[in-house]
Image (tube, rainbow, N blue to C red):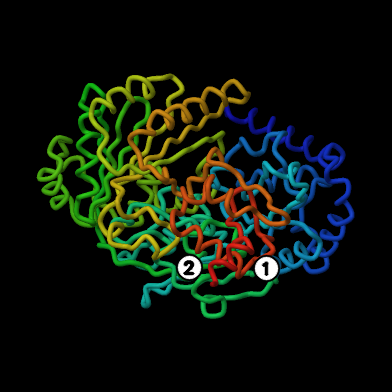
């Protein structure tokens, strides 16, 4: 009940913002005709009820907010889409792309709305470049077809990770799928950026287990792996969303899991040796057998060690006694569950919720968010962790610190196998995740200063040249795109954020972009740019 007034205020603010949107945006005056033509083009093939514009503020704002997970990007100073198309058929996506190309309206694609910087439904560059955009919302395209006999599934991009987990668990107790812990993430964005989760050390990323995809290209055609070509398919599986077309559905490989797995959650405070345990964890967790995933969540001055073990409690207890006796894990800490129940454990931090809760698309509330991430290649010394705890983690505005181990299968996959290049040479991934519910600039500045300050403090202890970042933890602080003529500048994108997300794979991604979208139709603040003409000519010699 306490959050109702905030939500109501946000709806009112957004509605007012919509009413004044065109009137108070002089840069859009010259494009009004093109926008009208674009909307007319849509209405020829898409039912009017599926097209929401600022002319109908209430329904427009409701749809915009439906999966807007970061409230920073629904505030009045953020540019909103000129229309939202709630596609219910693949043909609606094709029409949206064709009409957008024809009338000069960019199309952004939203599946679950979990983009950390809101780029699937908002823009920080609209006024700068005078580029009106529409949002193609795929939430209604959420069909899942599991073929347990072939250990495969087709899943549409609008389905959530939780819905896929539930469908797989309902089809078989001995199959799973490697993906992230948040059940409300949209499959489309998650797979596009790689998809890291509790099975990554055993089976790799989600993108490593993609077999095929159905995509709307820049001409509005439907293509799959065989017709798009292997380079295009490679770029889709980890190259980030919204650069290479609209992925409508994915064919994924399901992986074998035991019918019974084991989880635990062990919380330790600073007085219970939390700092010493984190220091030891840095070497233990990445070197553990690939059947064990052991992460650390640091929140409220406590370290929560959460584990998934692909086996029974006795085996996990013996392993922990051998590798990490300092944690003090006992068999009473274990809970033996099915694999699908383990996904609910990581999503809701308890095994008491039924698997059906994975189907609740609104189970994670929206809040204000700023996140940053790093990769750690050498264990951070104990005295540094002591200083971090005292200086940063004991502050009232301190937020969540997440430590996710690599190693296992991750270490054996070459960096160029998919666009995700961070597998080898990294012990673990570190995420700084600040979220808050209070309205106002004072709260925002305090929380964002914390996450940015801690990120700066960690610079000497994390990867360098580049300071590597996971693209699904998008961070506009790294830099945003600039135009070079009518297309995104390759060199500016590479220097500011491209090498950090993709390292040596960035150039290949740009080459694919040049091939499939040379006019840079699918673009946002951190979309992949085409290669510049001069560079293409030099590289071809």
Name the residue that disc number 1 marks: 218
Q: Measuring 81% from the left and 61% from the top, which residue is drawn there?
A: 103
The residue that appears at 25% across and 34% down in the rendered structure is 278
Q: Nearer the viewer, residue 288 or 387?
A: 387
Residue drawn at x 24%, y 40% as measured from the top left: 282
Is the residue 527 above or below the residue 77 in the image? below
Q: Quadrant of residue 511?
A: bottom right
Q: Is residue 309 above or below residue 170?
A: above
Residue 172: percent from left, percent from top: 35, 67
Percent of width and height locating residue 24: 84, 36
Where, quadrant-wise, is the N terminus in this rendering? top right
Mark 2 vs mark 1, CA separation in Å:
17 Å
Q: Residue at x 64, y 70 (%)?
A: 217
177 left or right of 185?
left
Q: Earlier in the sequence, mark 2 or mark 1?
A: 1
Apparent side of residue 443 relative to residue 198 in the rendered image (left or right): right
Circles 2 and 1: CB atoms closer than 8 Å: no
Depth check, front residue: 286 or 84:
286
Give the quarter of the image for residue 527: bottom right
Look at the numbered disc 1 and give the secondary structure of its residue: loop
Label 2: how many residues lie within 10 Å, few (<14), some (14-19) or many (20+)?
Answer: many
Residue nearest the viewer, comparing 60 with 388:
388
Of 208 and 310, the residue lying toward us? 208
Residue hosting label 2: 234
Up/down of 270 relative to 131, above or below: above
68 with respect to 420 (left or right): right
């Amino acid at each position: 009940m306490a959050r109702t007034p905030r939500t109501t205020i946000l709806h009112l603010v957004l509605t007012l913002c919509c009413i004044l949107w065109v009137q108070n945006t002089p840069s859009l005056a010259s494009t009004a005709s093109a926008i009208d033509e674009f909307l007319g083009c849509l209405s020829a093939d898409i039912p009017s009820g599926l097209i929401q514009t600022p002319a109908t503020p209430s329904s427009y704002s409701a749809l915009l907010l439906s999966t807007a997970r970061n409230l920073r990007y629904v505030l009045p100073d953020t540019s909103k889409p000129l229309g939202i198309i709630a596609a219910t058929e693949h043909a609606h996506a094709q029409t949206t792309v064709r009409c957008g190309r024809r009338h000069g309206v960019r199309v952004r694609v939203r599946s679950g709305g979990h983009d950390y910087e809101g780029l699937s439904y908002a823009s920080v560059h609209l006024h700068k470049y005078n580029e009106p955009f529409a949002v193609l919302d795929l939430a209604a395209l959420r069909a899942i077809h599991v073929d347990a006999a072939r250990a495969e599934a087709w899943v549409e991009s609008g389905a959530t990770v939780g819905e896929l987990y539930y469908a797989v668990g309902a089809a078989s107790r001995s199959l799973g799928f490697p993906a992230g812990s948040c059940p409300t993430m949209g499959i489309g964005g998650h797979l596009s950026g790689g998809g890291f989760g509790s099975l990554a050390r055993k089976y790799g990323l989600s993108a490593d287990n993609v077999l095929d995809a159905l995509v709307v290209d820049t001409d509005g055609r439907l293509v799959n792996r065989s017709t798009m070509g292997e380079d295009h398919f490679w770029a889709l599986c980890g190259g980030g969303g919204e650069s290479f077309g609209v992925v409508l559905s994915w064919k994924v490989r399901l992986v074998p899991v035991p019918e019974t797995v084991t989880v635990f959650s062990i919380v330790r405070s600073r007085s219970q040796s939390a700092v010493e345990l984190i220091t030891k964890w840095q070497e233990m967790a990445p070197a553990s057998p690939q059947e064990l995933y052991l992460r650390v969540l640091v929140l409220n001055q406590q370290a929560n060690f959460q584990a998934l073990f692909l086996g029974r409690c006795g085996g996990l207890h013996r392993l922990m006694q051998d590798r990490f006796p300092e944690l003090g894990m006992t068999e009473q800490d274990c809970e033996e569950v099915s694999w699908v129940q383990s996904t609910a454990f990581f999503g809701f931090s308890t095994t008491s919720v039924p698997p059906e809760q994975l189907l609740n698309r609104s189970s994670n509330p929206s809040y204000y968010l700023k996140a940053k991430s790093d990769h750690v290649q050498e264990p951070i010394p104990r005295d540094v962790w002591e200083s971090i705890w005292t200086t940063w983690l004991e502050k009232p505005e301190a937020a969540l610190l997440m430590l996710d181990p690599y190693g296992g299968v991750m270490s054996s996959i070459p960096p160029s196998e998919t666009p995700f290049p961070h597998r080898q040479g990294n012990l673990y991934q570190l995420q700084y995740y600040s979220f808050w519910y209070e309205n106002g600039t004072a709260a925002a500045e305090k929380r964002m200063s914390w996450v940015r300050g801690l990120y700066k403090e960690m610079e000497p202890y994390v990867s360098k040249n580049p300071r590597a970042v996971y693209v699904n933890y998008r961070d506009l602080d790294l830099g945003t795109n600039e135009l070079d003529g009518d297309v995104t500048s390759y060199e500016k994108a590479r220097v500011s954020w491209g090498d950090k997300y993709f390292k040596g794979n960035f150039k290949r991604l740009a080459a694919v972009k040049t091939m499939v979208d040379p006019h840079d139709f699918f673009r946002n603040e951190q979309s992949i740019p085409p290669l510049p003409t001069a560079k293409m000519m030099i590289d071809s010699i």
